[in-house]
Image (spheres, helix red, strand yellow):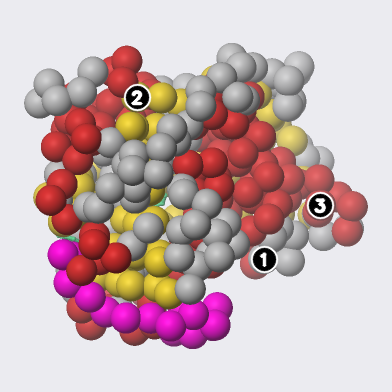
Amino acid sequence: MIIVPEAAIADLVTPEDAFAAVEAVFAAMSRDEARNFPVVREALPGPEEALYGFKGGVDVVGGALGLKAGGYWPHNLERRDLINHQSTVFLFDPETGKPTAMVGGNLLTALRTAAASAVSIAHLARKDAKVLGMIGAGHQSVFQMRAAVKQRAFEKVVGWNYHPDMLSRLADCAAELGLPFEEVSLDDLGARADVIISITSSTAPSLMDAHVAPGTHIACMGTDTKGKQEVEAKLLARATVFTDEVAQSISIGEAQHAVGQGLIAEGDVVELGKVINGDHPGRSSDDEITLFDGTGVGLQDLAVASAVVARAKETGAAIKVDF
Ligand code: NAD
């Protein structure tokens, strides 16, 4: 098997590679060629208050089998200068079960999560989208912004965060991308943004139905666990709701609340892969609100990790071990 350490990943995968891998695996899921396994997510006992779990799956045609093991250690940054998300991807040969690779999963998680919202923007946002609205200014937010701006000719970024002192991170990233940035209220953000990305660890809605203008595309990327929530459930009833995987969307994604309150049904949630495959028309008018509930599926991790492994073998960056 081979090992690709975390420090080697940045040189082995680009946001474009991640976009291609994630778009392809979403399409494969909707053709029933690839399947995610149920997510395991457990609170660990002890003072670190960590959440740990596994996201796995199998892509029969793409030849990927494996899992991402990891989670969220909320005190890592303050206690030991480590990022709070820690994860590792393990790949196996689907024909034999033998392990083939162990790949650092931290940067991959950020890239595959950003790729998912970028794929949703590519397929669902209005073509004339000009203003990108960002809700959230944590570790993931800048990866989201960098991937999003490649999908439309954005001219400006507007941002809001629950902790306003963190907004300089968004301002710096927008400057790096050559775009003006403005800190705004949620009212303003909803009125002005053509595309909104929400990536927070919130457990109560920030973006309300009344904030959002017709024609907006919203990528809700923060809600990946039971109990988290970023947008008002009513907004999902007004929008056409797309997701990476319906089972996750209604149980651990943003749709858990709207379905739980009876505002939408499971059958109202559409897999983005169907749009990619041409089996669903996607956006049907300039006034329609489209909402992507990006819950994060194991197959995204396997897809980008497989791309990294292939590149690591080509470039000689792979560490080979007998196992
Ligand atoms: P982070 O800890 O670096 O940042 C957290 C963000 O949430 C900050 O913007 C913070 O201000 C905001 N926040 C905290 N409490 C809030 C509250 N009560 N109300 C509103 N906002 C609040 O985290 P991160 O690494 O940027 O990740 C953000 C979220 O994305 C997390 O919930 C994480 O689990 C989730 N995530 C999802 C996926 C996916 O595939 N969908 C992948 C990775 C991370």
Residue 166: assigned label: none
Magenta span covers which residues? 172-187
Question: Dot 1: within a 10 Å radius of its alpha carbon, few (fewer than 14), some, or many (20 or more) residues?
Answer: few
User: Which comes sooner in the sequence, label 1 or label 3?
Assistant: 1
Q: Is residue 292 above or below residue 11?
A: above
- Please state the horizontal and vertical placement of residue 228, each as a whole percent of the image: 20, 44
- Please state the horizontal and vertical placement of residue 91, each as a whole percent of the image: 66, 35
Amino acid on which disc 3 is placed:
Arg
User: Which comes sooner in the sequence, label 2 or label 1?
Assistant: 1
SS under mark 2 = strand
Q: Is residue 115 above or below residue 244?
A: below
User: Which comes sooner in the sequence, label 2 or label 3?
Assistant: 2
The residue mark sitting in front, 2 or 1, is 2
Label 3 belongs to which residue?
311
Amino acid on which disc 1 is placed:
Ala
SS under mark 3 = helix
Q: Which quarter shows the C terminus?
A: top right
> Does the stretch in magenta take in 178?
yes
Residue nearer the viewer, 203 or 314: 203
Which residue does the image show at 33% across and 43% down from the upper left?
287
Label 1 belongs to which residue?
10
Q: To which quarter of the image does residue 138 belong? A: bottom left
> Does the stretch in magenta take in 292?
no
Can residue 40 be seen at all in this image of the molecule? no
| Image-based side of 135 in relation to 170, left or right | left
Q: Is residue 244 above or below residue 289?
A: above
Which residue does the image show at 60% across and 24% down from the upper left?
278
SS under mark 1 = loop
Label 2 belongs to which residue?
269
Instruction: Write down which quadrant ligand 1 falls in.
Output: bottom left
Identify the residue at the far front of this view.
286
Residue nearer the viewer, 71 or 27: 27
